[in-house]
Amino acid sequence: MKRDELVKYLDEYLRISEVTDESQNGLQVEGAEKVNRICYAVDGCFEAFQKATTSGAQMIIVHHGIFWGRFTPLRGIQRRRIKQLLDNNLSLYAVHLPLDLHPKVGNNVQLAKLLGLRVKGPFGEYHGISIGVEAELKKEVSLEEFIRMAEERLGGKMRVVDFGPKLIKRVGIVSGGAGSLVNDAGQRGLDLYFTGEPSHSAFRPAQEYGVNIIYGGHYLTETVGLKALARHLERKYGLEPEFIELPTGF
């Protein structure tokens, strides 16, 4: 399909204009006018752009783009990234917070679905909007069983801070690096807060509120939304997807 039609659809579907974000969400670098194949990656980096080029993609959609806040000078690694994109006519589309909070393909909704949780409502305020979800299990399970299930379904090792109940039902979920939102989980009396990247500053609030934290990894918890978006675009437009796995270990 035409690049500009796809970008228009993505902007509207992901509600780019409605979400305040430091990321310059949307089309960050313009490539080929027609798109048949899309690659997806968590991080916009040179290696991801290389792999997308090799795969024959005309566009790469990432969660972490290459333009944030103010203008970034095009030198050093930034120049190298841009050159790789432009030399190969590869479009770069970035979607950060709008993907975290999307009600259908969002990272947090998809994490809840993957973990067998039913979404009850919004959770975790950031920049004046709720970016996560509060969800619950049909019945209580032990913390150990929840950890085992999370590791099995996400395919990675969980890190655990176990200051809360031994039986889990009510869970707050925010993907990525959102350790500070453990305060929200504590104030709501949740059994568990599930996020991505470990945070020193979250330790004492978890201890004092008496809430468990599971850290699933910043990278790993932010793969699920992109994969859901890939499935959506493949069903809607027949655009061939490829997810580029470049885990960081964090």
Image (cartoon, helix red, strand yellow):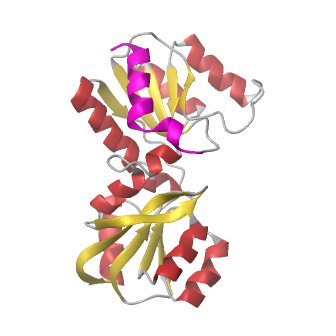
Q: Quadrant of residue 109?
A: bottom left
**In screen coordinates, is 161 left or right of 170?**
right
**In screen coordinates, is 138 left or right of 56?**
left
Is residue 82 positioned above or below 224 on the image? above
Instruction: Pinpoint residue 231: horizontal percent, then vertical percent.
Output: 27, 37
Instruction: Pinpoint residue 167: horizontal percent, then vertical percent.
Output: 33, 87
Q: Quadrant of residue 207?
A: bottom right
Give the quadrant of the C terminus: bottom right
Is residue 26 positioned above or below 247 on the image? above
Instruction: Identify which residue is drawn at 53% across, 44% down.
Output: 19
Residue 197 shows up from this direction: no
Residue 117 in the magenta stretch? The answer is no
Q: Nearer the viewer, residue 250 or 114?
A: 114
Q: Across the whole image, how many numbered discs are drawn on residues?
A: 0
Instruction: Identify which residue is drawn at 55% across, 32% down.
Output: 47
Q: Quadrant of residue 23?
A: top right
Give the quadrant of the N terminus: top left
Q: Main secondary structure of the magenta part?
A: helix
Instruction: Pinpoint residue 82: horizontal percent, then vertical percent.
Output: 64, 21
Instruction: Pinpoint residue 160: horizontal percent, then vertical percent.
Output: 48, 77
Q: Tell me which segment is drawn in magenta.
A: 1-20
Instruction: Identify which residue is drawn at 61% across, 79% down.
Output: 203
**In screen coordinates, is 73 left or right of 162?**
right
Residue 234 shows up from this direction: yes
